[in-house]
Image (cartoon, helix red, strand yellow):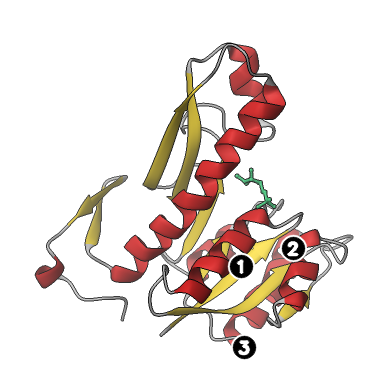
Amino acid sequence: MKNLGILLSGRGSNFEAIAKNVASGEIRDARISAVLSNKADAGGLAIARQLGLNAIVIPSKGKQREEHDREVVAALRQAKVDLVCLAGYMRLLSPWFVQQFPRRILNIHPSLLPAFPGLEAQEQAFAYGVKIAGCTVHFVDEELDHGPIIVQKAIQVLDKGDERTLAARILEQEHIAYSEAINIVLAGNFEIVGRKMVMTLAAEKGPLP
Ligand code: GRF
């Protein structure tokens, strides 16, 4: 059984989708041992409390990045977190944080990376006039929206849509993609070659140590 730690700053719909899939067994052999936010009023924390999960607030305001990160990592370690899932966590992680969980931190981004990193990716994509949009789940490295890609989902941009409907349709895919990525990472049947995730045979590699 692996422990997931969710980091979020906002409404928490990706977290909620993960929680549902953990409860149903769609995400296998995992439980959520911590839901941590830098914002006390994050909607996702209220959902975590309703679900009876371990909801933790560590305010980031007025703190140096690494000082905050050290408190967050201590809380994750206390909850024995194996895999950290950023789900709308609006903080860039310090290199120190990234090094504490090598290849054990995932992020979801609402674009087909490397297109449109950063804030308001869906709006950027819509304004650019792309015909295909989507989302990416990737390992976190020291650069923003940058690490090796685990799962991507693509959708067509509809002529009759606007930025809001596009963002909502991407979000539906995010809710599917994140759980798929968690299952892949927990199963451990892959290696990272350069920046590519390459699937290996189940027999060749076991699950996470
Ligand atoms: C999602 O669009 C995610 O891709 C981005 O932040 C948003 C979080 O939404 N990183 P929610 O809080 O999971 O509803």
**Foreground of the two, 4 or 167:** 167
Report the side of 132 relative to 46 (left or right): left
Q: Position of residue 31 (x, y in %)?
A: 51, 80
* Residue that label 1 marks: 6
Indicate the secondary structure of the residue bearing disc 1. strand
User: What's under tag 1, amino acid-wise?
Assistant: Ile
- Mark 1, Cα crowd under 10 Å, few <14 / some 14-19 / many 20+, is many
Q: CA distance from mark 3 to mark 1?
A: 14 Å
Is 5 situated above or below 199? below
User: What's under tag 2, amino acid-wise?
Assistant: Gly
Q: Position of residue 178 (x, y in %)?
A: 48, 54
**Foreground of the two, 138 or 144:** 138
**Foreground of the two, 205 or 70:** 205
Residue 24 in view (yes/no): yes
Q: CA distance from mark 2 to mark 3?
A: 21 Å
Q: Is mark 2 within 8 Å of ligand 1?
A: yes
User: What's under tag 3, amino acid-wise?
Assistant: Gln
Give the mark, 3 or 1, whose residue is nearer the N terminus. Answer: 1
Task: Residue 44: give its label.
Answer: 2
| CB atoms of marks 1 and 2 within 8 Å | yes
Residue at the image point whose x is 53% and y is 20% from the top: 157
Report the side of 131 relative to 29 (left or right): right
* Residue that label 3 marks: 78
